[in-house]
């Protein structure tokens, strides 16, 4: 498995939503595990990644990982909590690559570009990134109750709110950000591509059109 990317900074601007949005980082930023526990976790993730590649992330189970790793099922639950925690752990590296790109990467996605340009680039980056890893992202979206409360989702929301404020967007900033996030939902994107036959380019143009309608630059 690839090593996780180093921790990244969160948006620094004061934000009235800071009390509502917890930009907690992903599980790899939690206190360092003992060396043996960390090795066991890495081994379980390697086994889970292999099973997901062979059978599809939608069919990944805690029991299958335990059997393939030749450990008790309780060991897998202790490391990841539940199946959702396991899938999120598998996604961690991919998600960190995306987060590093929009938080600290080069323009137009990164901080050296004007906010409206960053908004346009953000949608295209998320659409292409999640489509490239669609199996895992779709598996992670099965836990409906946690779709909007996991750290990655809260970080995306906070980032969009920051860009919208910098672009002097009118109206309820958080609701506009939620509307934009709804457009990027992997279930919707997957449906439009595989059921409606739309191209990634068409979805990107639609995102740019939506940004243009919702954002009025100063």
Image (cartoon, grey):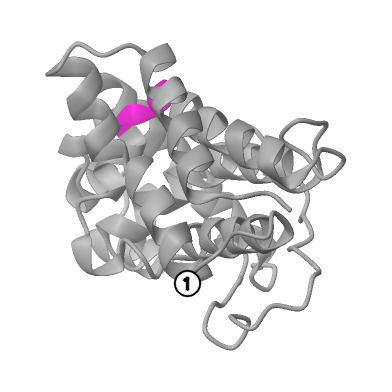
Residue at 20% in and 61% down: 144
Q: On the rendered structure, is 84 left or right of 22?
A: left
Residue at 14% in and 17% down: 196
Where is residue 4 drawn, in percent x and y? 67, 44
Quadrant position of residue 18 = bottom right
Residue at 21% in and 24% down: 192
Q: On the image, numbered disc 1 is attached to which residue?
A: 172
Where is residue 183 drawn, in percent x and y? 34, 42
Q: In the displayed image of the protein, which residue is found farthest to the bottom?
A: 19
Q: On the rendered structure, is 218 left or right of 71?
A: right
Q: Is residue 49 above or below residue 21?
A: above
In what element is the residue under mark 1? loop
- Residue range of the region highlighted in magenta in the rendering: 131-135
* Label 1 Cα neighbours within 10 Å, binned few <14 / some 14-19 / many ≥20: few
Where is residue 138 drawn, in percent x and y? 27, 39
- Note whether residue 55 is visible: no
Q: Looking at the picture, tell me which residue is in the foreground, 168 or 74.
A: 168
Where is residue 142 drawn, in percent x and y? 19, 51
Q: Looking at the picture, tell me which residue is in the foreground, 59 or 138.
A: 138
- Note whether residue 76 is visible: yes
Q: Is residue 93 magenta?
A: no
């Amino acid at each position: 498995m690839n090593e996780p990317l180093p921790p990244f900074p969160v948006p620094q601007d004061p934000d009235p939503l800071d009390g509502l949005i917890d930009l907690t980082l992903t599980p790899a930023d939690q206190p360092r595990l003992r060396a043996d526990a960390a090795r066991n976790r890495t081994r379980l993730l390697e086994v889970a990644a292999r099973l997901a590649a062979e059978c599809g992330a939608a069919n990944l189970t805690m029991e299958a990982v335990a059997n393939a790793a030749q450990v008790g099922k309780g060991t897998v639950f202790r490391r990841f909590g539940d199946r959702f925690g396991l899938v999120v752990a598998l996604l961690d590296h991919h998600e960190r690559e995306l987060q590093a790109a929009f938080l600290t990467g080069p323009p137009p996605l990164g901080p050296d570009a004007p906010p409206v340009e960053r908004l346009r680039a953000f949608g295209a980056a998320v659409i292409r990134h999640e489509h490239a890893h669609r199996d895992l992202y779709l598996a992670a979206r099965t836990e409906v109750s946690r779709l909007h409360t996991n750290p990655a989702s809260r970080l995306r929301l906070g980032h969009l709110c920051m860009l919208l404020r910098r672009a002097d967007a009118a109206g309820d900033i958080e609701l506009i950000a939620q509307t934009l996030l709804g457009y990027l939902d992997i279930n919707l994107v997957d449906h439009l591509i595989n059921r409606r036959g739309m191209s990634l380019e068409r979805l990107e143009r639609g995102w740019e059109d939506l940004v243009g309608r919702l954002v009025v630059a100063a």
